[in-house]
Amino acid sequence: MKTACVILAGGAGKRMKSERPKVLAEVLCKPMLGWVLDAAEDFGFDEVAVVTGFGAELTGGYVSSRGGNVTICHQAQQKGTGDAVKSAEDVIARCDAVCVLNGDAPFIDADTLKASLELHTSTGSEVTVITAEIDDPKGYGRIIRADGAFSAIREQKDCSPEEAEICEVNSGAYWFSAKKLLETLPKLSTNNAAGEYYLTDCVELLTSRQAFKSANPDIVLGANTRGALLELNQLARLRKLSRLMEEGVSFITPDGIIIGTDVRIGCDTTILPNTVILGNTVIGKGCTIGANSHIENCTIGDNVQLNNVQAYDSVVENNVKIGPFAQLRPGTTIREGVKIGDFVEIKNSDIGVNTAVAHLTYVGDSDVGRGVNFGCGCVTANYDGINKFRTKIGDHAFIGCNTNLIAPVEVGENATTAAGSTVTKNVPANSLAVERGQMRVIENWGKNALRKKK
């Protein structure tokens, strides 16, 4: 059986007060649409379509940036959910079963999709409504059952007092027989207060119906306002921290800690307050991260200490100590045993095993050997205003305080640059490079007597 997923992502979300489509509002720094696409990918649909509308260029751009085989369909005018699904008719026609999901309901999960499809196919249903039981059903369509069998979806405004007490609600996600859905869509009418085509009318028009109750009540949650979005973020954040604690990660306090859903962290690692870890970051065992750190798309080894560090698209090997107030910019690799101190910036460089870059130093576009020592205030000058050039430093070199290395330049193995030197030529191995003006001493200088003494 061939399956398709149609994700509705065309809503403007006017109550968000945003110029961007609602589905691009972020939960844990990932667009809500990204969460839904992740669930679809985990499920393994044969085809996935995203229906855009308001802000189509932004939504389509985000979908394309993720890669993968996703068809982008466009709803020219926002005429309701039924009309949105019509925009994906070509995709639906190529499949046997189609799942319709809302792009602003980020907590749908692959397990729910798989279990609901099993019910849908085993019963031969034309439509299966995915539901959940929640504590506060106000505002949701209620699931009406007769002797346990699904009967109808009753909207809040149409509920009797008894029906309003029902806690099983419609999630807005459905499985359809692709053939029956295509037959039913042309029958939809705009004979309603909003003058729109409602997908829920398809449920009423089809005769063979089921309702699958998910074990995950969060699947119904979405965000129409900034306040609701904040609640989604808080729920997702605490849920991620809880999972990490179950896996052996420690938090002294959860205050100010944001960890993305795709982040992986090894056991016996401690995350300190006011730390943000995002993207596809992987952190090893026995590390201490924070406080006040921002890590994004990095691979970090075991027994690493990052104190007040900003790191992006970088690799840090085992037993490294960095910070405070250090920055790793994209393309950086920090090898095992390296020590990087305060006010150091490393960019697009490979720093060799056991090298020390203690403080107030910039290393950019450089290949640094093992056991190198940088004194205070060193700079690799990698840019001439037009092009960038690389610096190469051999094993066990000693870079004296306040050295400027003007790239392209090489410092050989076990070589030394004297403090205060500006190095513009290659330094051979085992040699000393000195570049200074000659010092003069003027004894009994008159201005010394004119200074105010305190």
Image (cartoon, grey):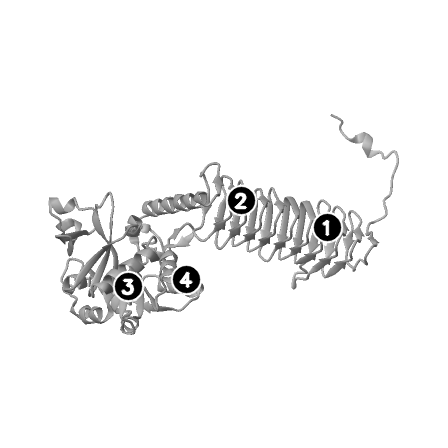
- Point 65% across, 63% down: residue: 386
Say whether residue 79 is visible: no
Say which mark, if any, is on residue 99.
3
Label 3: few (<14), some (14–19) or many (≥20) C-alpha neighbours in 10 Å: many
Sequence-wise first label, 3 or 2: 3
- The amino acid beneath tag 2 is Ser
Gap in Å between the C-alphas at discs 3 and 2? 40 Å
- The amino acid beneath tag 4 is Tyr
The residue under label 2 is 293
Label 1: few (<14), some (14–19) or many (≥20) C-alpha neighbours in 10 Å: many
Q: Position of residue 137 (x, y in %)?
A: 22, 46
Q: Position of residue 3 (x, y in %)?
A: 31, 68
Say whether residue 68 is visible: yes
Sequence-wise first label, 2 or 1: 2
Mark 4 vs mark 3: in front: 3
Gap in Å between the C-alphas at discs 1 and 3? 58 Å
The residue under label 1 is 371
Say which mark, if any, is on residue 62.
4
- The amino acid beneath tag 1 is Gly
Sequence-wise first label, 4 or 1: 4
Looking at this view, name the residue that lies furthest to the front.
122
Mark 3 vs mark 2: in front: 3
- Up the image or down, 454 lies above or below 232; here it is above
Callout 1: helix, strand or loop?
Answer: loop
- The amino acid beneath tag 3 is Cys
Callout 2: helix, strand or loop?
Answer: loop
Looking at this view, name the residue that lies furthest to the right.
443
The reply, left or right, for residue 16 in relation to residue 137 is: right
Gap in Å between the C-alphas at discs 4 and 1? 44 Å
- Point 31% across, 65% down: residue: 5
Q: Position of residue 298 (x, y in %)?
A: 54, 53
